[in-house]
Image (spheres, rainbow, N blue to C red):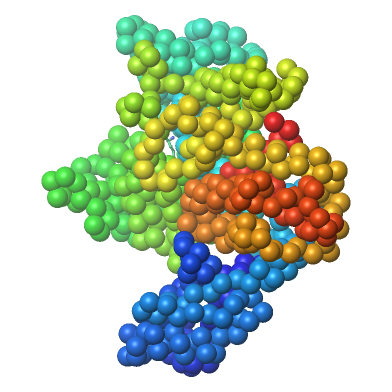
Amino acid sequence: MQSITRELEQRLTVALRACFGDAAEGVDPMLRPTQDPSFGDYQANFAMALARTLKQKPRDVAEAVVERLDVADLCGPPQVAGPGFINLTLLPAAAGRRLQAIPPAARDGLDRVGIDPTPAPAVVAIDMSSPNLAKEMHVGHLRSTIIGDCIARMLEFEGHHVHRINHVGDWGTQFGMLIEHLRRTHPDVLNDPEHLRLGDLESFYVQAKQRFDADEEFATAARRAVVDLQSGDPATLAVWRAFCEESLRHCHEIYERLDIRVEDRGESFYNDLLPRIVDDLARVGLAVESDGAMCVFLDGFRNREGEPLPMIIRKSDGGYNYDTTDLAALRHRIEALGATRLLYVVGLPQKQHFDMLFAAARKAGWAGDKVELTHIGFGSMLAASGKMFKTREGGTVKLKHLLDEAVERARNVLEANEQDPEKKRGLAPEQMQVIAETVGVGAVKYFDLSHALGSDYKFEWDTMLSMDGNTAPYMLYAYARIRSIGREAGVDYAALPPDTPIVLEHESEIRLGKMLLRLPDVIEQAGREYRPNVITEYLFELSKAYNGFYDRKRGVRVKDATPESVRLSRLRLCDLTARTLKLGLHLLGIGTLEQM
Ligand code: ARG
């Protein structure tokens, strides 16, 4: 299914050229879906800006273009409104034809709902999740993990080759303490690193830290371990590796539950590349010595006192920094992975770090004009009270516990429904567990992704688990219900003949049909602007349009509609709605249920 806006834009461009020749070269028709249906379905807003360049009246410009605009096969007569907007209304017959042309779902693999991949795939590196391995994953890692995965899914769907890079913190002084503690608590670690299991990394860290602070002999040994680690002592490296692997196993239990795959590439991976980073920058005069440290000064970055703020890439003790590693990682992604789009899904507090990183990479010539560097920053997840998200005791909430609670709460909702004769669905206990897992984890993801990335949001269990509103349970239920309508109507949606005409007549039918046709534009916009909530908003609008269509009073009969051609047309609309919901949820990282 080609996007309608793309097609209308092309037609507008042709008309613009016919009217204004070279003066229309490169003019963006500025076509947008309208919010208010009384202005039609799409509105082109180019006339105001173009009129200024042409020194003409905007309305005259708009009218001249309408005169030459050839859209009769798609739209009713274009209307010029207000100062010079062009309003376009899709013809129901044209909308029906386009829906009918959507090919059936592929037998296996993802159903693309007729949307073609890009002809120009790029290699994309998305830096996401990236917890520090010294500790357990906590709620602070949730957003980067699920937003990063959603953006990866959108870009993959567009046809790009995506690396989800887990830039875990696996290096630094705190590992000395952990290595030493591990040696003493698990003396067999070197003989049998594979079988190392630490039940709880968080308390392991706390114990190591306590010992470090209280026991001078231990602290000296821990510092010694840092030196040994840095100088590459094989036995120390082996203990360190065993710890990191065990910590990564904990992370991957979470990723598995979230249905997320990442490529683990920790900070240590870049260690050997760090000296060259400093040398190369020094050679071109970008890195200079200041108080024994090597620094990169970049235009426009100043500290609170207004003095130039350097990026320190080698400390005076010879050690390297977070910045140095990120420079090496950036270069590696471009040079070794061949990535031309580098995205970093990291909280907004690190904005300045990325601004400086990108400025340095540009200045050094490591990222040329054709390489995109984007920090996709996001706000914090707050407790429902609006305060920091903490356990009752004031500790950080482990991600594992948050997900367990989500599933448990979802299960409680389902069980309560089973007690209610009106809502009872007669689910078997095993079925209930599968549903609870999908609904619980889906609710957490959907709720997060439905918020604008840039702002903080409050984590509210009741809202996200509600069966009503812009939530995962509601969307999952909408999907399952449409699937069951097919069963009740005695049709296999997948077997409906693809040449069954789709006829849009009733107002609610037209509205649903046009909403379905927005899908390619929605995916395109969400992917271009890195905004998952463009998808959640669309799914919510779509499900409302579907409810209007299926409603006894406001809508049309479906299962028992007559004649048969109308019944089949409406069942195909049901199927397309379900397919669209499924694809939308898939892009958010949420699987669907056939029954719920
Ligand atoms: N490990 C870092 C943290 O927990 C996040 C890393 C983000 N990615 C990066 N390339 N700097 O704050």
> In which of the image's four quarters is ligand 1 placed?
top left
Left or right, 395 with respect to 262, comes to: left
Q: Position of residue 428 (x, y in %)?
A: 75, 19
226 is higher (above) or lower (below) than 19? above
Number of marks: 0
385 is higher (above) or lower (below) than 19? above
Q: Position of residue 566 (x, y in %)?
A: 79, 59
Q: Position of residue 162 (x, y in %)?
A: 60, 51
Left or right, 84 with respect to 239, comes to: left
98 is higher (above) or lower (below) than 282? below
The front one of 321 and 155 is 155
The front one of 366 and 396 is 396
- The residue at the point 52 percent across, 90 percent down is 67
The front one of 403 and 578 is 578
- The residue at the point 57 percent across, 48 percent down is 544
- The residue positioned farthest toward the front in the image shown: 553
461 is higher (above) or lower (below) than 544? above
Image quarter of the N terminus: bottom right
Residue 463 in sight here: yes
Q: Position of residue 112 (x, y in %)?
A: 71, 55
- The residue at the point 38 percent across, 21 percent down is 390
- The residue at the point 61 percent across, 51 percent down is 554
Image quarter of the C terminus: top right
Residue 153 in sight here: no
The front one of 237 and 242 is 242
